[in-house]
Amino acid sequence: MESRFLMEPVADKKKAILESTLELVKENGFHGTPMSMVAKKAGVAAGTIYHYFDSKDRLICELYSYVRQQSIQAIVTVDDTTLPYQERFFAIWWSLYSFYINNPNVLRFFEQFVNSPYNAKMEEIRNDEFHKLLYCFFRGGIEQGHLRPVNPEILGVLVHGSIITTAKVYGSGKIPFGDEELKQIAQILWDGISVQ
């Protein structure tokens, strides 16, 4: 995978601030998470936060980029271009699903972020590196004749949306998904978008 998608290391204190903010936002929302609370949770002085982030807005936007990089890694670490396209699809589906269920704070953060004024400060969704990566994957599948010839952005939204919804339902505990049911969900998606 291209080196531009590799995650750069984050300084320990900065990482502690980001991870603490992620947890606090899940519990208290954006407005209920002041910088002083973040500093306390991260175990750093209030001034340390301002060394890395000049405002809470900047912190929240960088947190979005930080967790988005993690979701990118969930794709690039499993996408082996030497494998058949269908196997790549299932590997990416499972990896993203596993990432979200193992990181419920990230799932909750994305949900809050997308529905907040912070989202307006970010670049258009199609310019987001995560979505570019998904669109590129689906565009390749269309060009190689594996997928139906539709807009790859639609496929990206459809597939990613199904992964997020499945992870939310699993996280709620209302429908106990086993591996067989999860395989069926991924298979139904594949059957719907692939050329039969």
Image: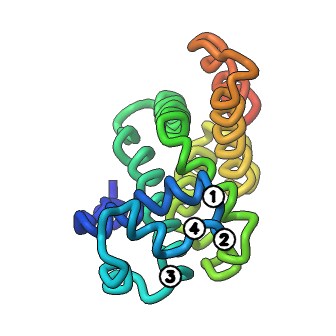
Marks 4 and 2 in Cβ contact (< 8 Å): yes
Name the amino acid type tagged 3: Arg
> Label 3 belongs to which residue?
58
> Label 1 belongs to which residue?
28
Q: Is residue 195 above or below residue 51?
A: above
Which disc number belongs to residue 33?
Answer: 4
Marks 4 and 1 in Cβ contact (< 8 Å): yes
Mark 1, secondary structure of its residue? helix
- Which mark is nearer the camera, 4 or 3? 4
Q: Is residue 49 above or below residue 154?
A: below
Mark 2, secondary structure of its residue? loop
Label 4 – label 3 distance at C-alpha? 14 Å
Marks 2 and 1 in Cβ contact (< 8 Å): yes
Label 2 – label 1 distance at C-alpha? 7 Å
Q: Position of residue 6 (x, y in %)?
A: 31, 59
Label 3 – label 1 distance at C-alpha? 18 Å
Neighbour tally class for label 2: few under 14, some 14-19, many 20 plus, Cα within 10 Å: few
Label 4 – label 2 distance at C-alpha? 6 Å
